Amino acid sequence: VVTSPPSGAMVMEAESIYSLIPQPVSVPSRPPMYRSKHPPDMPATFSTFGLAGTSKPGFNNVGGTLEEQQQAHSYVQPHATFGLPNGASAPNPGLPLSKGSGRGGGAVLLADRVDKFSYGDTARKPPVPSRAELEASFRATLKEKESREVKNFVTSNAVENILSVPPTEPAPIDWTKKPDFGKVPAYLDKIKKEISDEYEYIRSMQEAEADDTPSGMRKLEEEERQELVNQLKRRWDELNVTYQKTSVLSLNSLDTIGKVKRKEMLEAQLAQIEKDIEKLSKKVVYVRHDEY
């Protein structure tokens, strides 16, 4: 006997002992099979099926009637399903086929009598020669070869060599009688002209570069420029030694106006010499004619 748990007690789903008791499973009842009220062989409302190739419009059963309507004409024509209707082509047992009454494959109706095939007036190839004809032709060919004159190649070659004219050696060529003998070749004249044109072009460029010298100025030679740079460097060293030896480096020693002026004079001379060295360090230096 299965007793239900007390109604007032709180039952936990995972901890209750009643969950171990199998509960009866109810079997659902099967509903009855559905059957439509519409006939299965009637077209649906505004159906477009089976209307191709007919004179009907593109739809059928506009009103959606459930009863079969009287058609004006049948749109399924005879032979519309690949051949005669079923049973129309059955053989007639009262008319069996006899010999010669067929149609020759069912596509062409043959005549009652068929004559033997012949080519007619068309041109035909000559027949194949017989063995006797071939033997006769072979014997005639052998006789024709035997009747020909046999050539003696030894005698023929001897006669040809006796009657032939010996070959003559070409006369030696005198190269000193050539029209251009002793003359300079034309290609050397061309090369000399190209070299002279190149020298002329270089000379013109040098003259154009020399013409760029400003008026009243001349280009300082490399030896003169280097000598001036060396003299300026020696002068700078002398002034720098004097500047370092004097007591004008600290601000405490600049207690008189003369010391201040002497310091400014030495610094100005050193700066001027550095500027002159920088100018003379260029590759091209122009000076006046009356300076050096």
Image: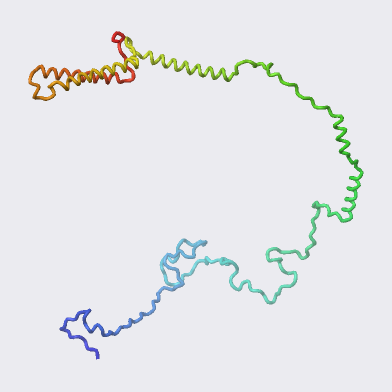
Along the viewing direction, whichever of 63 and 89 lies nearer the viewer: 89
* Drawn side of residue 42 relative to residue 114, left or right: left
Classify 112 as above or below 23.
above
Q: Residue furthest bottom?
A: 1
Residue 15: x, y in percent? 21, 80
Along the viewing direction, whichever of 70 and 197 lies nearer the viewer: 197
* Residue at point 11%, 18% (across, down): 259
Along the viewing direction, whichever of 73 and 159 lies nearer the viewer: 159
Classify 173 as above or below 88.
above
Residue 159: x, y in percent? 88, 33
| Image quadrant where residue 265 sits | top left
* Drawn side of residue 29 relative to residue 20, left or right: right
* Residue at point 18%, 86% (across, down): 6
Classify 17 as above or below 155.
below
| Image quadrant where residue 26 sits | bottom left
* Residue at point 91%, 47% (across, down): 143
